[in-house]
Image (cartoon, rainbow, N blue to C red):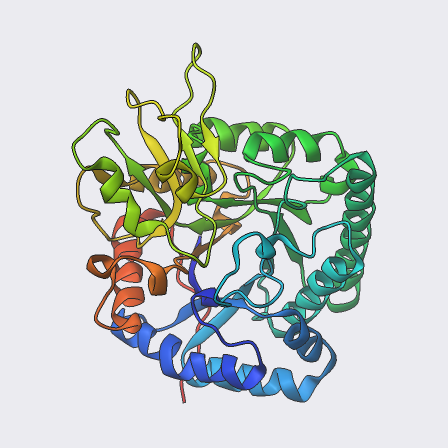
Amino acid sequence: MELSYCTNVHPAEDLDGIIEQLDVHAGPVRAAAHLDSLGVGLWIPAETAALLAAEAPSRDRLAAALARNGLVLRTINAFPYRGFHDDVVKLAVYRPDWTTAERLRYTVDCARLLAAMLPEGASGSISTLPLGWREGWDATADAAADASLRELVEQLREIERRTGRTVRVGIEPEPGCILDDVADVVSWLGARPYLVEDGLLGLCLDTCHLAVSFADPALAVAAATDAGVRVVKVQASVALELTDPSADGALEALAPFAEARYVHQVRARPTASVVDFAVDDLPQVLQADAAWPTDRPWRVHVHIPLHATPQPPLRATTEVLLSAVAAVLQTPHGADAHLDVETYTWSVLPEHLRPETLVDGIAAELRWASAHLSTALAPPAEVVVP
């Protein structure tokens, strides 16, 4: 699996800003991580994606920035449409959803620009949202999403026919969405074999989201494989777990993670005899009138740096990441999946988890990934650094 880090940690929304972040952050990260070359999973907002898909000179500028920094582009994060670093993002990150022409157009633009910039012989991947947020979703919305994804697959086929480059899109399940977990993606796509029959549409496995769902990584990946749903991308991330909610100061330990920009869904470990406990954002637990169960762990959708060690009674779900990567490698196309480190939360983490500089933090994550996921990693294509 080829390693990259996702640039949605950076707020740039136009081409100049994206190029600057490659020069100021990604290139120095590669050097600090002691890597001869490094993959980047670009986050490109909709307007800039349209520009890059349409204009070869703009792509040339981006390609030059990648080359001079020793960077390789194989994957794009097309989940956030724009404004991912607004003061308040919350549920806006799920709009526009897959019922809209805007979402389809944005994803096709990302596929076209990626196909134009892939290294020779390489395939590309794009991650996208799990249809949309669950509220207000009905049969009409489901049919519209089905039609949009049919058109997406046809556009991906046309790109492959025209360019000879394969670009795959992975649906990324997330708690609270229509496709809340891997089982939902497997069920929804499994009922639509016309969407997955050629492997151009599959699963993006975010291992933080997987941990929050309390799913068994090996069983989840096996279920996808058995249903003919290919894992095209793994977003390497870990969630926050409160191991003992009855411990003194447990809620106080969680409180610093309840910030205003992003949603932080919370789940308690399900049991056969107790109704599942699930909320859409951490403040709903901290301010709840009725107490949550204290006899089992809670998990929170917070992307913790891969190498970080939260202070007890908190911990990181690192074992879910390790198990998921191992499971994906056992699938027929697992070694072709892209492995993208996606800790976008650096700016909103509590002080004790923040590095001295962002370059230091991301480089430390990549060194950790190289050491602990080494059996999963393959060196990227040779890059000539001027």
x and y percent of residue 111 in the render?
Answer: 68, 64
Quadrant in the rendering for residue 362 = bottom left
- 59 above or below 75? below
Q: In screen coordinates, is 86 left or right of 385?
A: right
Q: In screen coordinates, is 136 left or right of 211?
A: right
x and y percent of residue 253 in the render?
Answer: 23, 43
Quadrant in the rendering for residue 355 = bottom left
Residue at image location 23% in from the left, 57% down from the top: 353
x and y percent of residue 63 in the render?
Answer: 55, 82
- 147 above or below 167? above
Residue at image location 46% in from the left, 43% down from the top: 281
- Image label count: 0
Residue 320 visible in this rendered orientation of the protein: yes
Q: In screen coordinates, is 317 left or right of 334?
A: left
Residue at image location 36% in from the left, 26% down from the top: 292
- Quarter that holds the C terminus: bottom left
x and y percent of residue 238 in the render?
Answer: 35, 46
Q: Check the image and name the residue furthest to the top.
A: 273
Q: Check the image and name the residue furthest to the front.
A: 289
Of residues 48 and 65, the one drawn nearer to the viewer in this rendering: 48
- 122 above or below 317? below
Of residues 225 and 260, the one drawn nearer to the viewer in this rendering: 260
Q: In screen coordinates, is 189 left or right of 15?
A: right
Quadrant in the rendering for residue 78 = bottom right
